[in-house]
């Protein structure tokens, strides 16, 4: 089996080297067990993101800006049987990859899944926030992109890849996956930077995100949500 890890980027020079180095180091521990490629799909960075990515990733592609568009572009040049989509500010450990391998090799009915969220901070509130996010994912069966989403490549194309919408592309993608087969959330974690909450405020960002997902699930269009998101600091 071959796995393609696809990472969308836009002006991420401050952390992309650190994160790619970490992921490559974790993957090296299981290189005998799994063939992996790392693909960075850039949306037109104006800093040194692409230059740095070319030193660490197996492939780099440039596409139009937009997380969904970028992830679709990365998928088009991938060689993997399975695709794992990670945000640029997220990392996955050897343990996480092993957990994914174990479940997809033992349960062939699984077409995709995600990981538990762990926010990279020692602050107590972030631990509570992670716990609530993971509880919500378990109850609703919905995962966000910062949890790392993996999918069989043939299923990815069958459902049309990521939708070309300005926000909630990850939630819509997971909804489509669940309509076509078994989607699971693993016990292993993907670790995501706390920078968004640090920058915009922990409580405010949390409440805003809850409002956005609630509005989306009751049918408010992504275009309206994106406008509201920008107006309120997103």
Image (cartoon, helix red, strand yellow):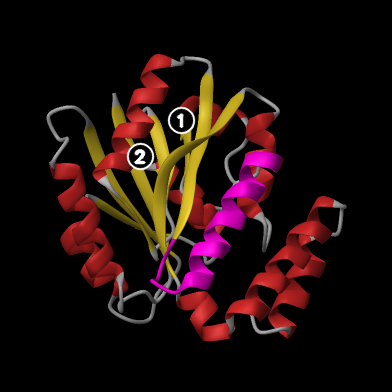
| 10 Å crowding of disc 2: few (<14), some (14-19), many (20+) | many
Query: Could you tell me how many numbered marks the image carries?
Result: 2
- In the figure, is residue 203 to the left or right of 192? right
Q: Secondary structure at mark 1?
A: helix
Percent coordinates x, y for residue 212 in the rendering:
75, 65
Q: Main secondary structure of the magenta part?
A: helix
The residue located at (51%, 76%) in the rendering is 196
Q: Secondary structure at mark 2?
A: loop
The answer to whether 15 is drawn above or below residue 142 in the figure is below
Q: Residue 153's mark?
A: 1
Q: First in sequence, mark 1 or 2: give its number.
A: 2
Q: Identify the residue position indicated by label 2 in the image.
A: 78
The one of 111 and 59 positioned closer to us in this rendering: 111
Q: Residue 168's mark?
A: none
**Segment colored magenta:** 119-139
Percent coordinates x, y for residue 186 in the rendering:
47, 36
Percent coordinates x, y for residue 172 in the rendering:
69, 46
**How far separated are the C-alphas under marks 1 and 2?**
9 Å
Percent coordinates x, y for residue 44 in the rendering:
43, 71
Pointer 1 and pointer 2: residues touching (CB < 8 Å)?
yes
- In the figure, is residue 222 to the left or right of 31? right
The residue located at (57%, 40%) in the rendering is 161
The answer to whether 87 is drawn above or below residue 95 in the figure is below
The one of 18 and 186 positioned closer to us in this rendering: 186
Quadrant (top left, top right, bottom left, bottom right) of the N terminus = top left
Quadrant (top left, top right, bottom left, bottom right) of the C terminus = bottom right
| 10 Å crowding of disc 1: few (<14), some (14-19), many (20+) | many
The residue located at (62%, 48%) in the rendering is 135
- Does 218 lie within the magenta span? no
The answer to whether 23 is drawn above or below residue 3 in the figure is below
- In the figure, is residue 16 to the left or right of 163? left
- Does 129 lie within the magenta span? yes
């Amino acid at each position: 089996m071959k796995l393609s890890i696809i990472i969308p980027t836009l002006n991420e020079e401050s952390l992309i080297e650190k994160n790619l180095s970490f992921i490559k180091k974790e993957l090296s521990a299981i290189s005998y067990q799994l063939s992996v490629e790392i693909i960075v799909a850039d949306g037109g960075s104006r800093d040194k993101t692409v230059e740095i990515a070319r030193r660490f990733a197996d492939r780099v592609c440039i596409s139009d800006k937009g997380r969904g568009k970028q992830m679709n572009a990365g998928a088009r040049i991938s060689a993997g049987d399975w695709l794992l989509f990670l945000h640029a500010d997220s990392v996955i450990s050897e343990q996480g990859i092993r957990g994914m391998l174990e479940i997809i090799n033992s349960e062939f009915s699984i077409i995709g899944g995600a990981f538990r969220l762990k926010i990279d901070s020692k602050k107590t509130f972030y631990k509570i926030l992670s716990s609530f996010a993971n509880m919500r994912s378990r109850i609703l069966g919905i995962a966000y992109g910062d949890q790392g989403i993996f999918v069989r490549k043939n299923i990815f194309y069958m459902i049309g890849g990521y939708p070309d919408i300005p926000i909630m592309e990850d939630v819509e993608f997971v909804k489509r996956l669940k309509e076509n087969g078994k989607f699971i959330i693993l016990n292993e974690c993907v670790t995501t930077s706390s920078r968004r909450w640090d920058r915009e405020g922990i409580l405010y960002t949390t409440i805003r995100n809850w409002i956005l997902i609630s509005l989306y699930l009751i049918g408010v269009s992504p275009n309206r949500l994106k406008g509201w998101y920008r107006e309120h600091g997103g």
